[in-house]
């Protein structure tokens, strides 16, 4: 089992410690290898081969990734057994040495059902965890709201539960799988709570013909 790096983890440095467990009653040897991409093309490059010692949740090797370009890779651990069979574990791995580049495509007030809210739409060139940082203009206390999944695009929608009336300075940060953070250009937006009236509308009835 590959314990670290975990699936979809990233790195920005030149070396990665591969931690795992290699235990089996019929153990003969183990090998580690990698291939570019995640499509399973079976074009493996060895890291270490035919190691004859067993390991329990410890470092298997230190992998030199200084020559790897940015992108996705597949890491493979193979255990060879004395009966000729094999056991295998694979993890996706990302090499990423640059910070995400962020663009705010929309920042405006918008109606969410009957309530006025602030709508922030973001785009990034990298899959990342995004956080909206906001504070009132002229104040020092900053609050934040996290977008809880790795993505390249998404939006925040804030209303009275997060904002009080006034002008705000906002920015969005993005931290990629290698732990590198980038930020958008700060922007300002005003919020004023408002609700659409729930009276003064006529309720109309309608019917649809039976389907054929």
Image (spheres, helix red, strand yellow):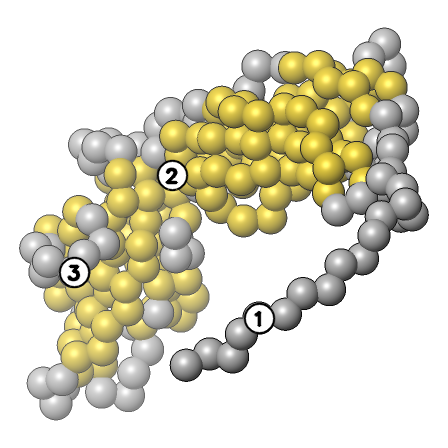
CA distance separating discs 1 and 3: 51 Å
Chain-order first, disc 2 or disc 1:
2
User: Dot 2 lies on which element?
Assistant: strand
- Hey, which quadrant is residue 129 in on the image? top right
Residue 194 rendering spot, x and y as whole percentages: 87, 33
How packed mark 2 is, by other alpha carbons closer than 10 Å (few <14, some 14-19, many 20 or more), is many
| Residue at image coords 63%, 70% | 207
The C terminus lies in which quarter of the figure? bottom left
Indicate the position of residue 92 as horizontal and vertical percent values.
Answer: 31, 54
Can I make out residue 88 in this image? yes
Q: Determine whether label 1 and label 3 are within 8 Å by CB.
A: no
Measure the alpha-carbon separation of dots 2 and 1. Answer: 58 Å
Judged from this view, the residue extending furthest toward the top is 138
Identify the residue position indicated by label 3 in the image.
40
User: What residue is shown with label 1?
Assistant: 208
Q: Residues within 10 Å of mark 3 (few under 14, many from 20)?
A: few
Q: Is residue 101 left or right of residue 161?
A: left
Among the 4 quarters of the image, the one containing residue 184: top right
Element marked by disc 3:
loop
Element at label 1: loop
In which quadrant is the N terminus drawn? bottom left
Percent across and percent down for residue 121 are: 57, 32
Give the crowd class for mark 1: few <14, some 14-19, many >=20 residues within 10 Å.
Answer: few
Height in image: 45 above or below 90?
above
The residue tagged 2 is 11
Name the foreground residue: 100 vs 83.
100
């Amino acid at each position: 089992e590959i314990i670290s790096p975990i699936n979809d983890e990233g790195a920005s440095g030149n070396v990665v410690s591969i931690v795992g467990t290699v235990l089996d009653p019929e153990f003969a040897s183990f090998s580690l290898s990698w291939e570019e991409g995640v499509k399973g093309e079976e074009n493996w490059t060895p890291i270490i081969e035919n190691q004859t010692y067993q390991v329990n949740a410890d470092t298997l090797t230190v992998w030199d990734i200084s020559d790897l370009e940015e992108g996705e890779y597949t890491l493979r651990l193979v255990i060879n057994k004395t009966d000729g069979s094999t056991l295998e574990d694979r993890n996706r791995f990302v090499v990423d040495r640059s910070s995400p580049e962020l663009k705010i495509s929309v920042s405006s007030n918008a109606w969410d059902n009957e309530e006025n809210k602030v709508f922030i739409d973001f785009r990034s060139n990298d899959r990342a965890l995004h956080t909206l940082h906001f504070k009132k203009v002229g104040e020092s206390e900053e609050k934040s709201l996290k977008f809880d999944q790795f993505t390249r695009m998404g939006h925040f929608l804030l209303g009275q539960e997060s904002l009080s009336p006034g002008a705000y300075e906002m920015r969005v940060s993005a931290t990629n799988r290698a732990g590198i953070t980038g930020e958008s250009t700060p922007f300002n937006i005003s919020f004023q709570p408002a609700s659409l009236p729930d009276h003064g509308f006529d309720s109309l009835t309608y019917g649809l013909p039976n389907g054929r």
